[in-house]
Image: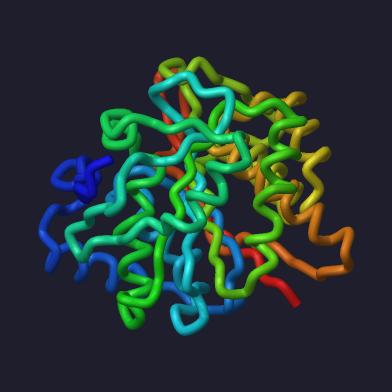
Amino acid sequence: MSNRVVCREASHAGSWYSASGSQLNAQLEGWLSQAQSTIRPARAIIAPHAGYTYCGACAAHAYKQVDPSITRRVFILGPSHHVPLSRCALSPADIYRTPLYDLRIDQKVYADLWKTGLFERMTLQTDEDEHSIEMHLPYTAKAMESHKDEFSIVPVLVGALSESKEQEYGKLLSKYLADPTNLFIISSDFCHWGQRFRYTYYDESQGEIYRSIEHLDKMGMSIIEQLDPMSFTNYLKKYRNTICGRHPIGVLLNAVAELRKSGLEMNFTFLNYAQSSECRNWQDSSVSYAAGALVVH
């Protein structure tokens, strides 16, 4: 085994977000300054992973709830968009680059996760092609900058998990969620609507199409706030809403359910909702974004 340090490049910098550290820093500061820190410290957040011009402002509402003074480890759970994956996968990298500063993977936690036999190893190519984790790295770096040498990250690529696998991974990760020095970032956009997404659910009673989309998303968001994994699964089965991070969300809900058995009190609150555009006819398309935070009492 060589001791060469493996770096994952910031492959979406320059397209999905600015490759200039100073410009990116100014944008993130601008968005964060518009958000309120109402429910800190967050133990977990749900935030979108689209290009920052679309969802940067929305994501800030989740990141504003992060307390860098207590956070020592940041788990980032993102869905797999490009490779078929029925389990969860770990990165081959040691370092994740961002235009702000490099983030270090926690190899001790990785070793513990690897030992369970439940994880695959993704290739560096798969890692760099995937945007669902990367889009959270600049925001993580920004939120944690006051303690930038004192934390590590634990990126986990989440496959198309069955209900029982969501339960299994939720149970496994619940011990990490129980630790107040850990933060979980759940990477998900909400409804992808339009013919290009092959999803055109429309409830005419809601008025314009974009209102129907909002009503559908907010139904799902209120179910997530109830922290009941079964209700969320049933909602997805009924409406087939194209929430791309549904499996990472399912893992979080199952981890919470596990901790609630031992009497831990938790609350999840959504703080912001946005759409990339307002759909009014069948030719239109949009992606929805939501930002929220979980606190432990």
Q: Position of residue 222 (x, y in %)?
A: 73, 51
Against 129, residue 3 (above or below) is below
Image quadrant assignment for residue 229: top right
Query: Is 37 situated left or right of 217 in this image?
Result: left
Residue positioned 58% across, 29% down in the render: 87
Residue positioned 42% across, 21% down in the render: 83
Image quadrant assignment for residue 46: bottom right
Query: Is 185 situated left or right of 232 in this image?
Result: left
Residue positioned 39% across, 23% down in the render: 82
Against 243, residue 86 (above or below) is above
Residue 244 shows up from this direction: no
Query: Is 246 situated left or right of 85 in this image?
Result: right
Q: Is the C terminus in the top left, top right, bottom left or bottom right quadrant? A: bottom right
Q: What sort of colour scheme is used for the picture?
A: rainbow
Residue positioned 21% across, 65% down in the render: 101
Q: Position of residue 149 (x, y in %)?
A: 31, 76
Q: Tag count in the figure? A: 0
Q: Which residue lies furthest to the front in this view?
A: 1
Q: Nearer the viewer, residue 296 or 205?
A: 296
Q: Which of 251 and 195 is in front in this view?
A: 251
Q: Is the N terminus in the top left, top right, bottom left or bottom right quadrant? A: top left
Q: Nearer the viewer, residue 283 or 13?
A: 13
Q: Where is residue 175 in the image (x, y as percent from the top left)?
A: 69, 60
Q: Where is residue 6 in the image (x, y as percent from the top left)?
A: 23, 46
Residue 56 shows up from this direction: yes
